[in-house]
Image (spheres, rainbow, N blue to C red):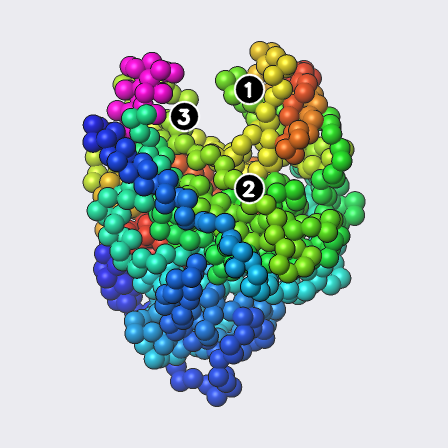
Amino acid sequence: MTVTRRRLMQRAGGAGALALSSWPSPTLLAAPGRAPLLTGTEFALEIEPVPLTINGRRAVATGINGQIPAPILRWREGDTVTLAVTNRLSEPSSIHWHGVRTPSPMDGVPGLIAPDETFVYRFPVHQSGTFWYHSHSMFQEQTGLYGAIVIEPKGGYAQAFDRDYVVLLSDWSFEPPETIVSNLKFQSDYYNYGQRTLGTFIDDAQRKGLADTVADRLEWGKMRMSPTDILDVSGATYTYLINGQAPGVNWTALFRPGERVRLRFINGSSMSIFDVRIPDLPMTIVQADGNDVMPVTVDEFRISVAETYDVIVRPAVDRAYTIFAQAEDRTGYARGTLAPRPGMAAAIPPMDPRPMRTMTDMGMGGMEHGEMPGMELSPEGKRLEGKVGVDNVAMMPAERLRRAGEGFPAGRRVLSYADLRATRPGSDPRPPTHEVRLHLTGNMERFIWGFDGKKFSEAGPIELKRGDRVRFVLINDTMMEHPIHLHGLWSELDNGHGEYRPYKHTIDVKPGERLSYLITADAPGRWAFHCHLLYHMEMGMFRDVRVS
Amino acid sequence: MIARLDRPLVIGSLSIALIACMNSAPTSAEQSTAVPLGIDLGGSGPVIASPQPEPPAHTTQIADQTASAEHDGDMHMAHEGHSDAHGTGTVNSVDPGQHKVNMSHAPIPEIGWPAMTMEFPVAPSVDLKAIKPGMSVNFTIEQQPGGMYEIRAITPSGGRR
């Protein structure tokens, strides 16, 4: 399947062909620096195997300039940056500048860098904020090829802070990604040890009555999914990392009591959604996906794969605070520390209970299963039902933007998408002239994922005219969350704030949810549009958007 | 169906073992070695007056939040030390089983909270029968020993949205 998509991408011609040719390495780019932070306008980056030790066990990962994560790239808004990327791997590679608005040939998807070749990316930087970069080839993102991009705003920051740290979350496995995929293809709940057992069946039967419990289990059986299957790949194989460090290593960011500390959270995972909190320290969210939002103070936020959130905290006391990022399925966590001095640690909180999927997640919000035989699918649903790539169609997709999601204990202030409000009106006040409606579909048991029941290899591109104002409507028919990323164009989430809708590059769609966002097709070219769960993308949840 | 119920029993104990060793607590050896320190990218420098949005006509909650952000251009953190606070909001849903209320509340200046949509546990002494989704309410919350806020009193303020 991977090969099919790659071949299609390579046949692209035009922009693709340009990107595929390799340029001579210009002399201005000296030997690549080995530092974990690179600043300026010219960068030499070498993609290479990097030895890594996690929990005392050695492995060879994929990094840049000897670093995992790849070095932080610090740019300035208004500069033109030049990045000569040399591939020292034995397989093709590429770099995608996630959330950065580059010309299409510089986006890192159309072309691949062959082994021992250099590709020079060069583009003007017209934005500021926290972004990241990662490989868009093979499974290199899983094996370590990700790093932060911090772009300083030309006109200064909107909020004051005294210190500034990148907190890049990721998931590491000693199993090769190819093994993970084949395990999932063989048995989709391979990494899911949290299934309901005969014991819980008996408990449920005592509580709800035997008939209801049997009906409930039969319904879940028909859905081809167990209700505790929250993330496909779990802590059974993953170690969750903060800036490349396992929980026991205790990556630490220093502060002096009373200082304001900006933390730039980036979820560079392949498959893991995290719930982030710092016990005893409220976090004020000031930016989402690189764009300023009206400050909103929370105890916890859920960060889906590829999203970024900037928060400001103000620890007043001379003590350590734990940065705690538990995986959504509660099979593990990433952990770091905010402390006045190195070597300090605070208590690590217990993980919260596992979220359970509900009938709302199945797209049957508010329905008792007894009523289901009388329900009618929409014509659209009927068209999708019965396709091999579709094992469920949401009958009643719900508006869920005001909900933070499942799995949060009551009493915590948890960010919801409805809380995100831009600090300035959107740049395109036109109403959309047409709509692109897509169902997010899957067949869990066969680990097939797609849009509208089609894998990438079976579907044509989404064609847009340059300058079009379009509403994208996404309906999630699956039981999983899908972080949907559109390259090259902003996705303006329609979350009730009118012209102050937040600009995002990645929009997480909850199970059974229907949401929409606006885009302005102001950048010509071919743009990838996909689920950012790496294995969902590789298994077909990918489309081409063409703007011409 | 039968197979689904049987298999987890076999791997049940295995899963506990796996989860137990997945994120083991740091050993003393690990703690004595130097911890990796974050790279401080530095302070913000002079802060610009960011363009503030016009208060939207349809919700006073967000307008209040805007006004407070304009007030000093700085963060509003929750202040420690307060035990109870009063607020107004609109009920989104009531869960009588778990004794919880989901509510969109206006800013609560006493504890520095902006307008938020969130779920609150409700004290057992509070009767939730009169509280319905869509209802505007006045409420009192009190901080619990664990840091969580719990509703101690909630009354309709009249009017549905």
Is residue A134 in view?
no
- Please state the horizontal and vertical placement of residue A388, each as a whole percent of the image: 20, 40
* Measured Cα–Cα span from mark 2 to mark 3: 32 Å
- Identify the residue position indicated by label 2 in the image: A349
Is residue A190 in view?
yes
Residue appearing at x 32%, y 52% in the figure: A535
Mark 2 residue element: loop
User: Which amino acid does the dot numbered 3 rest on?
Assistant: Gly
For residue A208: magenta? yes
Mark 1 residue element: loop
Residue appearing at x 57%, y 38% in the figure: A414
Q: Is residue A39 above or below residue A252?
A: below
Residue A407 lies left or right of residue A446; in this view the side is: right
* Measured Cα–Cα span from mark 1 to mark 3: 20 Å
Q: Is residue A335 above or below residue B121?
A: below
Q: Nearer the viewer, residue A83 or A69?
A: A69
Q: Which residues are magenta?
A: A200-223
- Identify the residue position indicated by label 3 in the image: A365
Mark 3 residue element: loop
- Identify the residue position indicated by label 1 in the image: B99
Residue A85 lies left or right of residue B114; in this view the side is: left
Residue appearing at x 35%, y 79% in the figure: A117
- Please state the horizontal and vertical placement of residue A497, each as a whole percent of the image: 59, 39
Marks 1 and 3: same chain? no
